Image: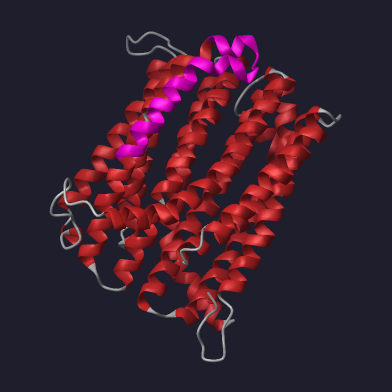
Amino acid sequence: MQRFLREVRPTLALAVPIIVGQVSQMLMGITDSVMIGHTGTVPLAASSFGGNVFGVFYLLGIGLMLPVAVFVARARGAAKSAECGEYLRHGVALALSFGALETLLLAALGTQLHRFGQPPEVEAIVLPFYLLIGASLTPVLVYLVLRQFAEAMGRPWVPMLIMLGGVGLNIVLNWIFIYGHLGAPALGLTGAGISTLVSRTLGTAVIFLWLRRDPAFRAAWPQRWFGGWSVARFWEMLHLGLPAAGMLLFESGAFAAAAIMMGWLGAVPLAAHQIAISCAATTFMVSLGLSMATGMRLSAVVGAGEHARLRPIGYGALGLGGGIAAAFTVIYLVAGPAVAGWFVNDVAVVKLAAQLLVVAALFQFFDGGQVIMAAALRGLTDAKVPALITFVAYWVLALPAGYWLGVRGSFGGVGVWTGLAAGLAFAAVFLTWRFTRLTRPQVGGSRTT
């Protein structure tokens, strides 16, 4: 137990600024939802629909970029500064390439949004917002690579401050463009898209300039950005990144499909879903930040050859995540209606959102556990089996259960969310089992791989 407790403190020290940065990133979506919600239920529902379709592409890109943190942390643990810079350089190249490709796919899909069966009033206003946030995809993926590099090098605080600054800028720009202040036209939902694009692009420029000028990164900063690419290094990153992207795609695709099912039930359930998912996603960012710190620490430990520390770090993070989840469970159970009321004045939307937050309260433990264990396994460069577990959890269990309970059954939106909760529970249990199996000590003190 003392070994586990010793590992909790450094994990938490690394995780706190990452958590604040992750929550700040979600706060950009939360403030959008709150400020859009004051313009009406239909714009809020449209932001939910457009944001969820965008979110599938965004999380796919995140998965492809996650190896940057893993391999930079491992190279740092092995005291190979030049290798850190090479993984940064190749990561930026991947972000630019996949960001451009996904932006084109988003634009093409924008011509087919009517096929998702959403309410006509939602379809009528969603496209400009959807295209604007789609244009922000490449800048935000480059930012993610730069931020992961800084965090894996042990410098997480400045990226956190940059994210907070981006949230503040987004709020100001929303005030200007959504409501029409300082001489700007009142653009409503489209104004929120403009604010998001500008905030994300400026944030990427700021973090790049900081990394370039900070002496702490001089030894690891790439000597060149273009040319001399290593196909082997790209493949190494994709070998881990593609299954990780698959995991995130399975999960985000399931939540996006759940949002579409909510749209089949009407604009009110879709708006309530947007409120509840915004809240649940924000608290999930705490677990996600903790998981990212856990994965980086495990990668560094593997690089340093200290395999006896793997279980204390992983299980210590899991226990810490359980305590955090308990706190959020209490908040959702006690203050759900009040939280929902911050977003919109529609009584029907607030009532349903409060019910969905009760379900969110119940799956906090599973949601936190599955993301922490998934990151721990990435730190061990294990991705294929976790991807299979995630596929079964969300597409074999969660979505069919949500469809039969919520769409075909009588439980409505609560039934859809209950199916999601079942999938999260399955993923948490079996990803923990996988980590336990891979870190099983042998007689000589080594581990099973």
Q: Nearer the viewer, residue 199 or 31?
A: 199
| Place of residue 138 in the rendered image (x, y in percent of width and height, measured from the top left) | 34, 34
Please report the residue visible at 62 percent of the width from the left and 17 percent of the height from the top: 41
Judge from the rendering whether residue 379 lies leftward or rightward of residue 90; answer left or right.
right
Judge from the rendering whether residue 58 lies leftward or rightward of residue 71; answer left or right.
right
Magenta stretch: dominant SS?
helix
Total labels drawn: 0
Please report the residue visible at 45 percent of the width from the left and 19 percent of the height from the top: 129
Residue 120 found in image quarter:
top right
| Place of residue 71 in the rendered image (x, y in percent of width and height, measured from the top left) | 35, 61
Judge from the rendering whether residue 51 lies leftward or rightward of residue 45; answer left or right.
left
Highlighted magenta segment, given as a residue range: 96-124
Is 97 part of what is drawn in magenta? Answer: yes
User: Is residue 162 in view?
Assistant: no
| Place of residue 190 in the rendered image (x, y in percent of width and height, measured from the top left) | 44, 16
Farthest-out residue, left: 223
| Place of residue 352 in the rendered image (x, y in percent of width and height, measured from the top left) | 74, 29
Judge from the rendering whether residue 253 lies leftward or rightward of residue 363; answer left or right.
left
Vertical order, 389 against 187 (above or below): below
Farthest-out residue, front: 231
Vertical order, 405 against 159 (above or below): above
User: If the image is split into quadrants, where does the N terminus sit?
Assistant: bottom right
Please report the residue visible at 35 percent of the width from the left and 57 percent of the height from the top: 151
Please report the residue visible at 67 percent of the width from the left and 42 percent of the height from the top: 395
Farthest-out residue, bottom: 444
Vertical order, 374 against 127 (above or below): below
